[in-house]
């Protein structure tokens, strides 16, 4: 019985993938909202820093890929070194005690982050030997990507603080006479919310779990949940299970207890979405959606850990950063539930929802997630998100 179903299902899925790929020309390929990572240190030689900027972002701004083959080589990067340095100096301004500092770039390197290769610019800030107050103005990439964020770590007398630059807040004033501070809780809450908002894979997984949450399986067919309370109770179990699971692995990864290869984690996240969508159609796990949420939530926690590592998590600040980031993720998830759930709840008694919305929605989710899985396993790009 199950084999003919799977044949039809995978045929529809791969046709959907082919259609999505045909509608996604290379020139329109997109990526998640970008971040750059800036570190400033107040040391014996004065103020020095390091700036990590994604190669893909620099390519958008400066055209690094000279032969347009989709790969930025070290030779191509070095050949545009002066242009990169000029771009950095024009878009990062540092003032100390009312005086302008000048960025003197000391070198160009390459490093890998969870979402690809980054150029690393090392520099000194000349003219500011021992500033007590700093003014930082950040203007990089906002004109190309309004979702771009500049995440800055300030290391001052052994304590690290985090600042986020955005188009709405491109400047910050910092008092270096105070020996640093703990990370701003609201900053990490905001980053958790933004990670859910820009993490299409996590959103799609949550939607795949919520689609059948307003229904119940009885004698091989779907029936509407008998009441709003029953539907909300089911949703609460799913979201709670996912929260507990990803909090466990996020904490383990952040403390360095468990580390998994990034490519494996991202591929497993895509696979979890495929299986959650297939379960909506074939019901391998019956009415235990919360178990599915918990099991795959363990995998998604490692994906959240990648984001935390990129924004500069430090062991001495784990309590605040983990709590804030987790809280932000949960607030983002609850916002998704609040926006998404009323419509399926209102339609749950209609055959249209049970036979079309649930099936078509799950098939579309599976098609997208299967394409993501292929991209992550074989390192190519097809979908425009």
Image (cartoon, grey):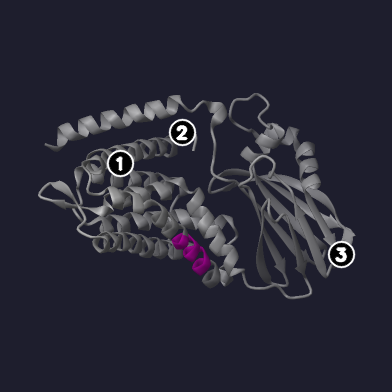
Q: Is residue 169 above or below residue 7?
A: below
Tell me what residue is drawn at x 74 percent, y 48 percent.
139
Q: Is residue 144 above or below residue 299?
A: above
Q: From the viewer's perspective, tell me whether residue 319 is left or right of residue 333.
A: right
Rendering quarter of residue 368: top left
- List x then y, in percent, for residue 104: 83, 50
Tell me what residue is drawn at x 70 percent, y 58 percent.
39
Boundaries of the magenta span: 322-331
- List x then y, in percent, for residue 367: 35, 35
Q: Nearer the viewer, residue 309 or 43?
A: 309
- List x then y, in percent, for residue 63: 69, 31
Q: Mark 3 vs mark 1: give the one in front.
A: 1
Q: Residue furthest bottom?
A: 178
Q: Mark 1 vs mark 2: give the one in front.
A: 1
Q: Is residue 75 above or below residue 197?
A: above
Give the mark nearer the N terminus: 1 vs 2: 1
Question: Taking the image as drawn, is residue 324 in sight?
Answer: yes
The label number, if any, that marks residue 262 in the structure image:
none
The label number, if any, that marks residue 383 in the structure image:
2
Q: Which residue is mark 1?
A: 362
Q: Is residue 141 above or below residue 174?
A: above
Q: Mark 3 vs mark 2: give the one in front.
A: 2
Secondary structure found at label 3: loop
Q: Nearer the viewer, residue 301 or 121?
A: 301
Q: From the viewer's perspective, tell me whether residue 115 is left or right of residue 289.
A: right
The label number, if any, that marks residue 129 in the structure image:
3
Rendering quarter of residue 330: bottom left
Secondary structure found at label 2: loop
How many residues crowd mark 3 within 10 Å: few (<14), some (14–19), many (20+)?
Answer: some
């Amino acid at each position: 019985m199950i084999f003919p179903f799977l044949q039809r299902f995978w045929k529809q899925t791969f046709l959907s993938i082919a259609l999505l790929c045909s509608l996604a020309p290379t020139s329109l390929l997109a990526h998640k909202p970008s971040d750059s990572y800036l570190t400033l240190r107040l040391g014996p030689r004065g103020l020095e820093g390091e700036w990590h900027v994604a190669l893909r972002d620099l390519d958008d701004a400066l055209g690094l890929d000279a032969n347009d083959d989709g790969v930025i080589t070290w030779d191509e990067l070095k050949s545009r070194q002066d242009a990169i340095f000029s771009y950095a100096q024009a878009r990062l301004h540092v003032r100390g005690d009312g005086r302008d500092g000048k960025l003197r770039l000391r070198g160009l390197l390459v490093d890998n982050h969870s979402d690809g290769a980054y150029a690393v610019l090392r520099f000194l800030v000349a003219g500011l030997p021992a500033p007590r107050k700093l003014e930082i103005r950040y203007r990089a990439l906002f004109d190309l990507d309004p979702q771009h964020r500049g995440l800055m770590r300030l290391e001052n007398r052994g304590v690290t603080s985090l600042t986020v630059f955005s188009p709405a807040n491109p400047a910050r004033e910092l008092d270096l006479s105070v020996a640093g501070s703990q990370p701003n809780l609201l900053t990490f809450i905001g980053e958790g919310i933004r990670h859910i908002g820009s993490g299409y894979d996590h959103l799609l997984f949550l939607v795949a779990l919520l689609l059948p949450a307003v229904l119940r399986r009885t004698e091989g067919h779907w029936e509407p949940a008998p009441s709003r309370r029953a539907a909300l109770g089911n949703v609460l179990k799913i979201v709670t299970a996912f929260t507990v699971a990803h909090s466990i692995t996020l904490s383990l990864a952040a403390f360095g207890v468990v580390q998994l290869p990034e490519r494996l984690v991202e591929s497993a996240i895509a696979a979890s979405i495929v299986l959650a969508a297939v379960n909506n159609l074939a019901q391998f796990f019956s009415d235990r959606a919360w178990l599915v949420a918990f099991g795959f939530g363990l995998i998604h926690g490692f994906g959240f850990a990648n984001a935390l590592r990129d924004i500069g998590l430090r062991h001495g600040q784990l309590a605040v950063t983990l709590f804030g980031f987790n809280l932000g993720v949960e607030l983002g998830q609850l916002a998704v539930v609040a926006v998404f759930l009323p419509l399926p709840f209102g339609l749950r008694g209609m055959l249209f929802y049970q036979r079309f919305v649930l099936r078509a929605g799950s098939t579309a989710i599976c098609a997208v997630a299967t394409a993501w899985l292929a991209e992550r396993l074989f390192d190519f790009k097809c979908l425009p998100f």
